[in-house]
Amino acid sequence: MADAAPRYPHQLSGAMRQRVQLAIAVAGEPRLLIADEPTSAPDVTVQADILDLLRRYRDRTGAAILLVTHDLGVVAEIADTVAVAYAGRIIEQGPAHWVLTRPDHPYTQGLLAAVPDLAVAPGTPFVTLPGAPGAGPDDIAGCSFGPRCRLVQPRCAAKVPELDPVGEIHWSRCVRHPSAEVAVQPRPRGGARA
Ligand code: SF4
């Protein structure tokens, strides 16, 4: 890496630029490191290197790492606690091993079901979630996931569900849980996107 120091950024590969960014981020030994999609490099070797660097930094300094990612493989590999966000709100939170193996929220369940499985028979269609997310947390009345949810029911549109406990240290934002006893209101016309 030392021979990279005098070079300009455009003279470095994408993987080297990612490593430089990480080196800059940890140089001051922050107690909290926020890493937004740090493993976006297409090369899996580079991804593994970055995760290894993050893990060693955490173990050496005791710092907390807030890692933002769309990659459930990365979550499974490095996270202790996971918070799943949908349309600007956390919809499920808990220990990573728990959320990944016993997801409660229909969105988390859909995400995990959509992970490609090499063991399925050739020609088996991919599992997908129908529709698309709204633009923001207030774009859809009640539960933002309603228009795409296989378990949707009329009361889902009444108000935004609370993040309720579904275990000692596991929470889910869904009307299927106790504090969601709310009056049923009709969903406003035009408030939902398919
Ligand atoms: S609140 Fe309703 S729409 Fe939202 S995830 Fe739960 S069942 Fe589905």
Image: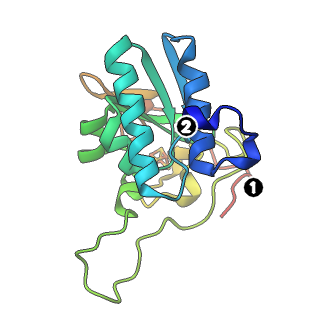
Q: Nearest the camera: 171 or 188? A: 171
Name the amino acid, label 1: Arg
Total residue callouts? 2
- Name which residue lies at 40% across and 49% down: 72
Up-down: is 74 above or below 128? above
Q: In which quarter of the image is the N terminus?
A: top right
Q: In which quarter of the image is the C terminus?
A: bottom right
Q: Nearest the camera: 178 or 4? A: 4
- Name which residue lies at 38% across and 41% down: 75
Report crowding for label 2: few under 14, some 14 to 19, many 20 or more residues within 10 A (C-alpha): some
Up-down: is 19 above or below 118? above
Report crowding for label 1: few under 14, some 14 to 19, many 20 or more residues within 10 A (C-alpha): few
Name the amino acid, label 2: Arg
Residue 16 image point, x, y percent:
58, 44
Q: In this view, does 78 lie to the left or right of 137?
A: left
Q: Is residue 32 left or right of residue 192?
A: left
Residue 154 image point, x, y percent:
52, 51
Mark closer to the chain start, 1 or 2:
2
Asked if one can make out residue 160 in the rendered structure from this viewpoint, the answer is no
Up-down: is 115 above or below 46? below
Asked if one can make out residue 128 in the rendered structure from this viewpoint, the answer is yes
**Which mark is drawn over residue 189?**
1
